[in-house]
Image (cartoon, coloured by chain):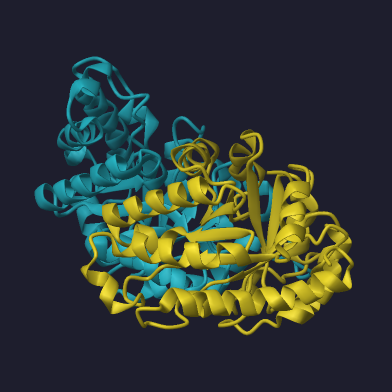
Chain colours: A yellow, B cyan
Amino acid sequence: MTANQLFKNICRKKSFLCIGLDTDIKKIPKHLLSEKKPIFEFNKAIVDATADFCVAYKLNIAFYESLGVEGWQALEETVDYIRHHYPDQFLIADAKRGDIGNTSEMYAHTFFEQFNFDAVTVAPYMGEDSVSPFLKYPDKWVILLALTSNKGAFDFQLTEDANGEKLFEKVLHRSMNWATSDRMMYVVGATKEAYFEKIREIVPNHFLLIPGVGAQGGDLEKVGELAINDQCGILVNSSRQILYASDSNLFYKAAAFEAQKIQQVMYAVLLKHGWVS
Amino acid sequence: MTANQLFKNICRKKSFLCIGLDTDIKKIPKHLLSEKKPIFEFNKAIVDATADFCVAYKLNIAFYESLGVEGWQALEETVDYIRHHYPDQFLIADAKRGDIGNTSEMYAHTFFEQFNFDAVTVAPYMGEDSVSPFLKYPDKWVILLALTSNKGAFDFQLTEDANGEKLFEKVLHRSMNWATSDRMMYVVGATKEAYFEKIREIVPNHFLLIPGVGAQGGDLEKVGELAINDQCGILVNSSRQILYASDSNLFYKAAAFEAQKIQQVMYAVLLKHGWVS
C-alpha cells in the first residue's frame, strides 16, 4: 500500500484510526475461555465489529508470543482473517525489532513473508544496517520509533547533541534518507504534543503512527490539529479503550461503540480539512 | 544465577565462551532436513558436542520466529533440552526487545516464564520503564544493548551530548542504577575495541556480552586483554564459526573442534589471570 492509497482509505472511511489488537488472555471476556481458540475468536469478533471505523490494525506481537505456540497460531489466524475479509486494512506488526543485518533479515522474513503484514515497527538504536533489511521488500513499510509515548522516552530520546539536536530529531533526519515517505513512518507518542511542530518541520511528508491516546493520556483533537499534514499523514492508535470496553457477551458491540466514538472525532477533524463531506 | 556463580563456571570450565544458536534452516547440513525436527536435532547435536567448552548458549529468537509455529517449538525443545541436560549453562534469549511497560511485561513473561531463560537482550531506546519489567524476576538478567558490533552503531550510539558524553555512555551511566551487576549485563561488540577502556571506567563490575568475534571481525585475545575485570566479567559469543564449521554428517564434531579452539585461547587468557591452573 502506498501513502496515497492509505490517504484514500482514510477519506473513504472518514477515519485515521488504527486499532491495536493487544489481546490479553487475562482481559478478554470469560465466556470466551471455553472456546477452542479464545484469542482468535476475540480478535475476529472485534475486527468484524470495528472494521468500518478504522483503516489499520496493529498487532502487538508481545501479547501473542507470550502464549507460545498457541499465541503464534492466533496471530497467524488473525492476520489471515483480516487479509481475507478486510483487504483494505493496513496491517502493522508492532514488534519493535532491530538487530544486526542477518538477524533483521530473519525478522523481516517473519513479518513480511511468513505473515503478510504491511509494516513492522523497528527500534533505531542499532542504526541503518539494522533497519535496511526491512526495506528490501517492495510495498512494505518500516515504522521507526522516534519519540515514544512512555515516561522512559525522556531517558535518551530527548538528549541533545553538541549542536542542540535531540536524539529523536537525529533519528528522523538520518532515517528519512533510508526510504521514501511511501515506505517509512514514525512512531510519535500522543503524549509528546510539545514536539509535533518540530517533527513536522523535519518530516513534513511522512505518516506518523501515534499511540498514547486514551489509556496513556493523549488528546485526540489536539494531536489532529498539530500533527496532520497535507495528506492527513497520521494514524492514531487506540487499543485498550476499544478492546476492553466491556467484558459482557456483547463486548464486540461495546468495542464498536468506542471505535465509532473515536471515528466521529476523526471525521470532524477530516471535515475541517475539506477531505470528506 | 549470580555473577559469582557465572564466574565460578567460567573458572571450572576454563572458558568464557557463549555459543550463539543462530540456527538457520538454509545452513544446516542437508541430511537433517529429512528429520522430523531438523532445527532441534541440529541444536541437540551442537549442544551435546560443545557443552564442555562453553558456559552459555544464546538463542537468537529471530531465527526461530522466522519458521513460525515450528520454529517456536524448536526453541522450546532446545531450551528444555539444555536446561535438563546441562543445567549449569547460562541461557540467553537474544531478542533485543523493549516496549512500553505493559508490553515489556509480556515479553518478560515469555522469556522468563513461558521459556526458562536466564537473561534476555533488551534495546534501551525507550528508557527505564521499558526495561524495568524484565528486572522484576529475581535471579533473571537483562542484557542491555550499549555499543553494538555493527556498522550502524555509528549512526546514533556514538553521538555526543553537549557535555561530550556519548549515547552508549549515557545508557551505561543511567542503567547501572536500574539493577545491580548481578542482574544487568551489557552488549558491547568485539569490533568496538577502542571503547573498552571507557566502558570499564563506567561499569567496572558488570559482565559484558561480547559478540562480533569471528565472522564479524573482532579479535578474541585483544578483547580479553581490554575487557576483562577482576571476576572475568565477559562472555564472548561465537555463532556462525562454530555452527557451520562443516555441513557433513559429522558437523557436530567440526563444531566441537571450533568451540574447543576458541576455548583454548580463553584458557590461556584465564591462566594469565591466575584463575585457572
Locate residue B37, reporting x and y percent.
20, 33
Q: Which residue lies furthest to the left in this view?
A: B85
A111 up-or-down from A146: above or below: above
Residue drawn at (53%, 74%), measured in percent from left and top?
A256
Nearer to me, A149 or B204: A149
B265 up-or-down from B171: above or below: above
- Is A113 left, or right, of B63 in this rendering? right
Q: Quadrant of residue B146?
A: bottom right
Q: Work out which quarter of the rendered image holds the C terminus of chain A and state it.
A: bottom right
A127 up-or-down from A195: above or below: above
Residue drawn at (41%, 74%), measured in percent from left and top?
B133
Can residue B129 be seen from the camera position used here? no
Nearer to me, B28 or A44: A44
Can residue B12 be seen from the camera position used here? yes
Residue drawn at (20%, 21%), measured in percent from left and top?
B34
Q: Which residue lies furthest to the front in this view?
A: A277
Q: Residue furthest top?
A: B248
Count of residue discs: 0
A15 up-or-down from A117: above or below: below
- Is A139 left, or right, of B59 in this rendering? right
Locate residue B82, reporting x and y percent.
17, 47
Nearer to me, A208 or B109: A208
Locate residue A1, reporting x and y percent.
68, 44
- Is B146 left, or right, of B140 in this rendering? right
Locate residue B25, reporting x and y percent.
34, 29
Q: Quadrant of residue A196?
A: bottom right
- Is A22 left, or right, of B21 in this rendering? right
Nearer to me, A221 or B107: A221
Residue drawn at (25%, 54%), measured in percent from left and top?
B90
